[in-house]
Image (cartoon, rainbow, N blue to C red):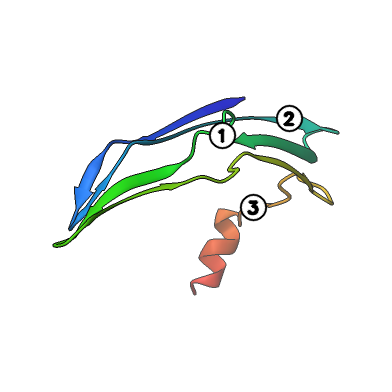
Amino acid sequence: MFINWYHQLPNKEDNTKYFAYKTLSTGIKTNLLNRKLNLNLTISDLFNTGKSSGIMYYTNNIQTYNNTWNSRRLNLSASYTFGDNSNKKSVKEASFEEKSRSNK
């Protein structure tokens, strides 16, 4: 299970002042069928607070903006691993007699 809080502090860049931007996301991951099936469920921007707003300063005017949209998302993903997961790497060591014979 996870919880992610993203918070961008108010800041200024060139002629624009950006207000705070914040979102809360959460999710859960589970493994089934001997860890071969992975399921992920994620909810992004749980409270739909991810909004962009600010003020732009120009010589003759000041413009404010407030962008609103539905930024809440639900993602469900699944992955399955086929085949045998065990490590089949085998190490074959030569005996000392074989090593000395090969160096002659």
* Residue under label 3: 91
Q: Is residue 59 left or right of residue 4?
A: left
Residue located 69% across and 52% down the image? 90
In the image, residue 53 sits, relative to residue 94, either above or below, namely above
Residue under the image location 58 percent in, 43 percent down: 71
Local secondary structure at mark 3: loop
From the viewer's perspective, is 91 left or right of 96?
A: right
Amino acid type, mark 1: Asn
Q: Secondary structure at mark 2?
A: strand
Say which residue label 1 marks: 48
Q: Nearer the viewer, residue 75 or 35?
A: 75
The residue that appears at 61% across and 54% down in the rendered structure is 93
Q: Nearer the viewer, residue 52 or 45?
A: 52
Question: How far apart in space, not on screen, are marks 2 and 3 (Cα)?
Answer: 34 Å
Instruction: Kindly indicate the quadrant of the structure image that contains residue 101.
Output: bottom right
Q: Amino acid at mark 3?
A: Val
